[in-house]
Amino acid sequence: QRVFAIPGTVCDDLRGTRWTGVPNRLSSDHHPWPVIDEVAAATEKVLPPSEAFWSAIDFDNSSLEIGDSPLALRRIIHQRRSAVALDGHTGITRDAFYRILLKLMPGSRQVPFTTLPWRPCVDLLLFVHRVPDLPPGLYALLRDPARRQALEEAMDRTFLWTRPAGCPASLPLFLLVEGDARSAAQQTSCDQEIAADGVFAAAMLTEYRASLEAFGPWFYRRLYWETGVIGQVLYLETEASGIRGTGIGCFFDDQTHQVFGLTGDRFQVLYHFTMGGPVDDPRLQTDPPYQHLARAHGREVPQE
């Protein structure tokens, strides 16, 4: 949990300033946003799913080796924080990059994706910036390789769809186009520099129309659940790799689609993410994890 702690020097500087303008008065009234209730009602699941819902795939993840890292899961979970800024120069090795992506693949032994019983509906569109021995540019990670033909047909026809050097045999990662992707990443993420200053940024692309037609409007929430699980794995894997990540909730989906040549609603971006070397904000104070629970029960937070 983070709270603002304003440095004393800032307070001293503010004492000598002259305020101008009249601030808007905050309303004490509730302002309804009816469309939110409409979406909640429209996406409620009222009937059991069909048999097709229970169709998770067993991905061949033989390229993912069991490491000998001394890092404990408890430690990684406890130290996991959202980055507020990235330094614009930190990178990770190509092997570390591939290892992170392998952890995002589904399968019978791929926790926590084993909690999702449906066939994976989310692929990743990647803006790669700072991975030595890997060309910067746009990439695609297919979490269901069976979607490759559909994506090739739906995306920019000039894309290369080539396998990057050193890529594990079982990792369905493809280079689409080489080049500086920093501007595209930043502009599609509401012009936030954090999307351009990291190792790579990701847009989570869902198989949108076919999923809703197959299962119904209630599956809309499940698409978000799947992107959320991917995001949580990215958070933990970035911490384990010595960097830091953050989800990006403000992004331009239509502009992201344009970068990759997508049109229509067959595929839809629902979430962005970025990671890199963190830049700490001295105005923020970080408490130990679960500190609020410890205070409530009058005990110390257990450490690793």
Image (cartoon, helix red, strand yellow):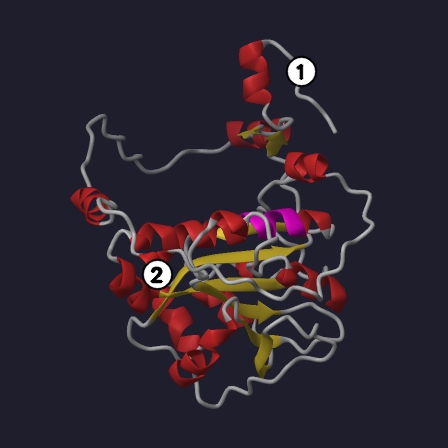
Q: Where is residue 297 in the image (x, y as percent from the top left)?
A: 56, 11
The residue at which mark 2 appears reads as: 52
Residue at (42%, 63%) from the top-left corner? 121
The quadrant holding residue 153 is: bottom left
The disc placed on residue 300 is 1
Residue at (58%, 32%) from the top-left corner? 10
Q: Position of residue 298 (x, y in %)?
A: 60, 9
Q: Which amino acid does label 2 sit on?
A: Ala
Please say if 152 is above or below 114: below
Instruction: Tell me which segment is drawn in magenta.
Output: 232-237
- The answer to whether residue 124 is visible is yes
Please say if 125 is above or below 87: below
- The answer to whether residue 199 is visible is no
Q: Residues within 10 Å of mark 2 (few under 14, many from 20)?
A: few
Q: Which amino acid does label 1 sit on?
A: Glu
Q: Nearer the viewer, residue 120 or 236?
A: 120
Label 1's element? loop
